[in-house]
Amino acid sequence: VNDPAKNDADAQIEAATAEQLWQLGAFGLQVPAELGGLGLSNTQYARLVEVVGAHDLGVGITLGAHQSIGFKGVLLFG
């Protein structure tokens, strides 16, 4: 179970939480399904990160970073 207070105190997400997010495909939310991701639309992605961020903003930001830093450039320009 994710513990936002512990994440804040430790300044990181627990490894078990990150592993569970990985297994759910949360680091590939907007990656097209044909490339192994979930293929969420911008609206679906925004809503999911909104819900996650309401519980633990750090986790929401982590998921957001994986959708924007590097991924979009590779997807758009190879």
Image (spheres, grey):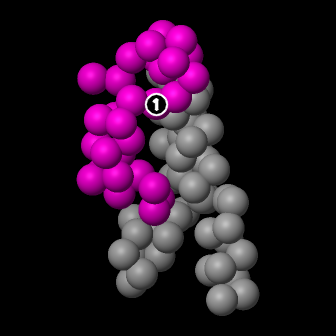
Q: Residue at x 57, y 42 (%)?
A: 62
The quadrant holding residue 50 is top right
Q: Would you say the magenta stretch is mainly helix, strand or loop?
A: helix
Mark 1, secondary structure of its residue: loop
Q: Nearer the viewer, residue 23 or 53?
A: 23
Question: Which of the 4 image quarters holds residue 1?
Answer: top left
- Magenta-highlighted residues: 1-29
Q: Which image quadrant: the C terminus?
A: bottom right
Whether residue 53 is visible to the viewer of this picture, yes or no, is no
Residue in view at x 71 percent, y 75 percent = 73
Query: Vertically, is 54 above or below 23?
Result: above
Residue 2 lies in the magenta stretch: yes
Residue extending farthest front: 10
Q: State the count of labels.
A: 1
Residue found 39% across the figure and 65% down from its top: 38
- Judge from the rendering whether residue 49 lies leftward or rightward of residue 26; answer left or right: right
Would you place residue 78 above or below residue 59 in this image?
below
Amino acid at the residue labelled 1:
Ile
Q: Position of residue 33 (x, y in %)?
A: 39, 76
Other residues around mark 1 within 10 Å, as few (<14) / some (14–19) / many (≥20): some
Residue ID for mark 1: 13
Look at the image and say whether residue 28 sits in the magenta stretch. Answer: yes
Query: x and y percent of residue 6 in the render?
Result: 45, 13
Horizontal and vertical percent position of residue 21: 35, 45
Of 6 and 76, the residue lying toward us: 6
Asked if residue 48 can be seen in this view, the reply is yes
Q: Residue 64, image x and y in percent?
A: 61, 48
Whether 61 is drawn above or below 27: the answer is above
Q: Is residue 72 left or right of residue 34?
A: right
